[in-house]
Amino acid sequence: MEAQRGWVADARSRGAQGAVSFAGEAERLTGQARSQPVQRWLAEIVGRMRNWLREKCGDVLGGILSGLILSIPTIIIGVGLLLAGPVGWTVLAGLLVVGVGLGIYGRWQEYKADHGGNGPGFLAGLGLVGLGIADLTGIPYIVEAAVGRRAFAPTGMSDFERWERGTQGVVNLALLVAGGAKKLFAERPPVEPVRAPVDPHTIPIPGESNNARFEAARQIILDTPPADRAAATRVLFPRLTELSGNTWNFRANPSADGGIHFTGEGAPFIFAIDNAGNAFQGKIGPGTLTIHPGAPTTVNYTTLRPLTPAPPPPPIPASTPATAPIPPVAPRLPAPPSEREPEPSH
């Protein structure tokens, strides 16, 4: 009789403890569900989507489509970076940190789902961290899809899961290769073409007419490095006047700043190279040339049209003789680009 009473008391105690434990576990699960409503909602949507694709499209096509859908956030970020301008290494490092964190979190959740909610041990945890980092390349996903089993999983994957995981790995690997190629090649500074040195004494000046030969000589000068343009002009234009028989009555004259200009008596046209190698061309108007007896002429480059992108240097102030002062003349604005400049007559 006493033994029966002891059994009853023990059963009542165990029942009470079980009820308390069940209530505590239910409360814990309820609180966890309340604290993770978004995760549960997304998990339910993804689960329904995967089931629908498996039923409607089969294991192969359904797995591929599911892998593409799950890779949409990765595709959007990757394509956005590819289409955007140059991205600094700081931005890329920040994106890598975020990607690694998400990869490790995903591996951790998969491990717990495969092992009844239990987390990994120390060595398994290190392996999951390494896999989470390597997942950025997509290679672990591709290997797992080929083998048919996730790392640390007790069971193999279905055909649907293999095609789904393999698709995700291929997408990650493709974006990594495309992004790396853009960073390494597309953002390199342009390389200046290497031009062979030109000898102005021997280079041919093609053209059947004086105008054609002038255009050819001018292009040779513009293709010459700026530091050598003035010297090339001193050689090319005397050759040009010799070829034409000097029918233009043009000649190359030194300028006060160390450059050279090409013009003729009574001609409204001038081609000039300053001491920095910048080229200019235009009409001769008031203020374009300042002639000094016994000294090189000063060229006001601001009245001419620059043929090279470098800005013109300020004109060097000329010392005017006290006996014959030259009154200052306001510089004339250059002609509009649409106005064709007169070419030297034959």
Image (cartoon, rainbow, N blue to C red):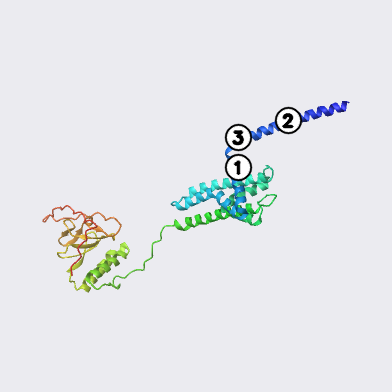
Amino acid carrying mark 1 in the image: Glu
- Helix, strand or loop at mark 3: helix
Residue 68 in picture, x, y percent from top left = 55, 52
Residue annotated with mark 2: 19
The disc, 2 or 3, on the residue closer to the chain's N-terminal end is 2
- Which of the numbered marks, if any, corresponds to residue 280? none
Residue annotated with mark 1: 44
Please identify, in this view, whether the residue under mark 3 or under mark 1 is nearer the observer: 1
Residue 291 in picture, x, y percent from top left = 16, 59
Please identify, in this view, whether the residue under mark 1 or under mark 2 is nearer the observer: 1
Image height of 16 relative to 337, above or below: above
Image height of 151 relative to 6, above or below: below
- Helix, strand or loop at mark 1: helix
Find the distance from the CA under tag 1 to the CA under tag 2. Answer: 30 Å
Q: Residue at x 59, y 37 (%)?
A: 37
- Which of the numbered marks, if any, corresponds to residue 34? 3
**From the viewer's perspective, is 228 left or right of 81?**
left
Q: Residue at x 69, y 31 (%)?
A: 23
Amino acid carrying mark 3 in the image: Arg
In front of the other: 188 or 177 = 177
**From the viewer's perspective, is 94 left or right of 108?**
left
